[in-house]
Amino acid sequence: MSSGSGDELARPLSLDPDPMESWLKLSGAVGLDDLELADFPVTGRGVRALRGFKEGEKILTIPSGILWTVEHAYADPLLGPALRSARPRLSVEDTLATYVLFVRSRESGYDGLRNHVASLPTSYSSSIFFAEDELEVCAGTSLYTITKQLDRSIKEDYRALVVRVLARHRDLFPLDKFTIEDVGVIHYKWALCTVWSRAMDFVLPDGNPIRLLAPFADMLNHSSEVKPCHVYDPSSGNLSVIAGKDYEAGDQTFIYYGPVPNSRLLRLYGFVVPGNPNDSYDLVLATHPSAPFFEQKHKLWVSAGLDSTCTIPLTLTDPLPKSVLRYLRIQRLDESDLAAIALRQIDATDGKISDSNEVEILRFLVESFRHLLDSFGTQLEKLEEQLAEGVYSPGGNAWAAAHVSLGEQRVLRLARKRAEDLLSAAESGSGNVRGSPSALARCANCEKAPAQLMLCGRCKAVAYCGRTCQVAHFKEHKAICRATASQSGSKTK
Ligand SMILES: C[S@@+](CC[C@H](N)C(=O)[O-])C[C@H]1O[C@@H](n2cnc3c(N)ncnc32)[C@H](O)[C@@H]1O
């Protein structure tokens, strides 16, 4: 479940001619002679280069005709009419999941696609398959909440799929293979995880999105060390993979799944990257329509590029985005503020409204962050201790959940600290905190402000009074350090 290239001990998976590979070649796939599937120690099965590739060189093309797409599902002579009869139309995700389940259930025909399905993992380690005690490790995180919600919604979605499609076409979806009971839900979850962890998303020139599964290209694991390197050609409809860096013969080849935080990685792909620089916390801000002056405030949120309900990601590099403050300033406007705004005496879409409004929203934020942090099942220091002591078996579900919790707590602590700094400045009337100067004026560990401080040599975004404090703070700082250094283009490893 952890990330890394782990190329050293890769074993080829089989020496027999692979039926999927033969089908791919016959269908016009290009590049397979220079690649092979192999088992890698850290990432699991992946794709190995059999010769060197230069960055930017095309390494693989999967032709349009054998991609799993919504269009192909609808064009299928058996499945298409069943899909078309569904009212309302199935979502893209459900269409692809139904397509995969349909092909898997066929006893004849669909030979190529069935070979692909046969090569898919039989189980997934997405958080939706976690046992209760494993999920409890990340109680308090957005992953915990979303996974619980998914547990309910997936059952409902499957029932809806049965009613809208499966039960109406029992000739295609026989009851013994598409049961209404729990087994059916388990198969549906498996198909959803297949789509979540293997589908690729692109935007077409007309602005419409396309989601597809590409046999063999879906065997490429993720690495943040490679540039984005999978491309869809809208004119041919083919999917290609370009070398995202230089490879030597024997290396594992990768694609880049994107700057994904651990909570999303674990839910969709079933793995985490320890110390993930993309970790984030999704802060949900909402106001009930019955709140005073809701209509006026709603207009102000919209003109500030927000809405009355907003989900704003807090990140390691920007733990308290301006949009959070902007939202709350509008939420706390009183009658006289609104009158001043109507007379254009105040601009509510940017900047401070008044000292009292600012202090009020910052107090609220500090309290909210404290409350959110208190709601985590296991506190950050305890989790770090447990991970160091090997309480969770490395790579296991509980271990991965612990990393998600660590990441979200680190982000929230930074957000709380930033709100506290802003609040003390607002209360003292200086109102002059821009993050960096105050952070650099005090030791990031003991918070003292001696005459001389030394900057972190890598990110240069925090300062320490001495080596002891730098070492003591390293665990907490390393993820944000990586993120800040990579954002500012630092070349240091
Ligand atoms: C697109 S598939 C890649 C092929 C997959 N390993 C297989 O055997 O079918 C995505 C899945 O590969 C695994 N994976 C990809 N990148 C990984 C990484 N960096 N570390 C650990 N597992 C990874 C995860 O299980 C993920 O859900």
Image (tube, rainbow, N blue to C red):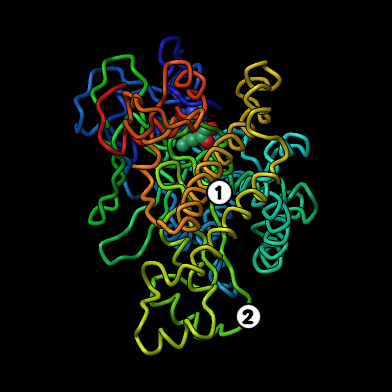
* Residue drawn at x 44%, y 66% as measured from the top left: 326
Q: Residues within 10 Å of mark 1 (few under 14, many from 20)?
A: many
Which image quadrant for residue 52? top left
Element type at mark 2: loop
Which residue, given by chain and number where applicable, does mark 1 sit on?
Answer: 100
Q: Position of residue 120 (x, y in %)?
A: 54, 35
State which quarter of the image contains the C terminus.
top left
Q: Residues within 10 Å of mark 2 (few under 14, many from 20)?
A: few
Do we see residue 19 in this rendering? no
Which image quadrant for residue 350? bottom left
Do we see residue 168 in this rendering? yes
Q: Which mark is residue 291?
A: 2
- Horizontal relation, residue 371 to residue 6: left or right: right
Residues 237 and 382: in front is 382
Residues 389 and 254: in front is 389
Element type at mark 1: helix
